[in-house]
Image: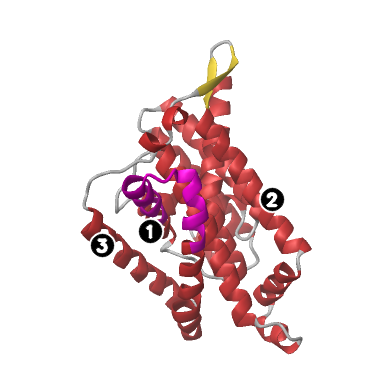
Amino acid sequence: MTNQIIQAILLGGYYALIACGLSFMFSIMKIINLAHGSLLVLSSYLFWWLADSYAISPFYSLSIVIPIMMMIGWALQEFLLQKSARGGELLPILTTFGLAIVLENLLFEYFGADTRSLAPYIGDLSWESWQILTDIYVGKTSVYILLSAISLLASLQLFMQKTAMGRQIRATAHDPDTAGLIGINARKASAIAAAIALGTIAISGLAMSIRGVFDAYSGGPQLLFAFEVTIIGGMGSLWGVLLGGIVLAMAQTIGASIHPQGFLIGGHVIFFVILLARLYMANSVIAIRIKKVFGGLR
């Protein structure tokens, strides 16, 4: 049981890492980015291409891929999301959904259906582990991913609270019109927030491609995990993302111990339970209607 808990915490660190960008973009820009998973896969392919074509270590490639993804985030906000947001709350969601489909098909067209992995390019790190108890081993990559998630979340938290730009981004997220009245360039702040979100996605892409395999259509499951973690941890809560990742991983571990196919089912069950609890407790029109519907069925 101890081993299962430890492994679930490590898996939760990975889930928190892939959900970080999704949660950050929603909390700042109020956009549910359905292209999150596809952009994550795009960054994974960039790491793989640099390693395969130019023999650049994936860890050194971070200095290349992160700026590329940040520029993509800036461009998406400036030329796509900014304009679609003027059409209402639904249009940005549809826009990112369409973007995800386009990205998936472009990646499939260029790279084909073969699965890829960065494990062959990181040497012994892909399989090395530490023995922490007599019969318990933890993979080094899993530990590094957990530490990366904690470091990234802490860095974002400090950036948002302690820097002038972070405070401008927070003000823009709270009320862009009022922020503009006090001299804040809301458009620039939103573009920077999108760039930061895509930078975190680059780090997530490295983690995904190191710990497993991926292909052009791997973005869907990653988006699902990221979305569930964000809901469980609380929309817009950075440290809640880490808690949500661990809770999701724990539920999956418990589900797997009950039934061989219970790994995913356990995660989905805890997601729906927490989602319904949040809807029930929320003071919103949707929650009130749900209460009336279920109250009328008694």
| Residue 218 in the image, given as x and y percentages of width and height | 34, 50
- Tag 3 and tag 2, C-beta contact below 8 Å: no
> What's drawn in magenta, residue-wise?
43-67
Question: In the structure shown, which secondary structural element does the residue marked by tag 3 occupy?
Answer: helix
Which quadrant of the structure image shows residue 191?
bottom right
Mark 2 near mark 1, Cβ–Cβ under 8 Å? no
Amino acid type, label 2: Ala
Q: Amino acid at mark 1?
A: Ser
Report x, y in % for residue 219: 37, 53
Disc 1 packing (10 Å; few <14; some 14–19; many ≥20) = many
Residue underneath mark 3: 105
> Residue at left 51%, top 36%?
11
- What predominant SS class does the magenta segment belong to? helix
Q: State the CA–CA distance, disc 1 to disc 3.
A: 10 Å
Please say whether residue 61 is one of the residues in the magenta stretch.
yes
**What kind of residue is marked 3?**
Asn
Circle on res. 154: 2
Give the x, y percent position of residue 112: 21, 52
Q: Which mark is residue 283?
A: none
Could one spot residue 72 in this view of the protein? yes
- Point 41% across, 63% down: residue: 35
Give the Cα distance between marks 3 and 2.
35 Å
Q: Which residue, as the protein is rendered here, is positioned at the far bottom?
A: 181
Q: Which mark is residue 38?
A: 1
Of the residues under marks 2 and 1, which one precedes in the sequence? 1
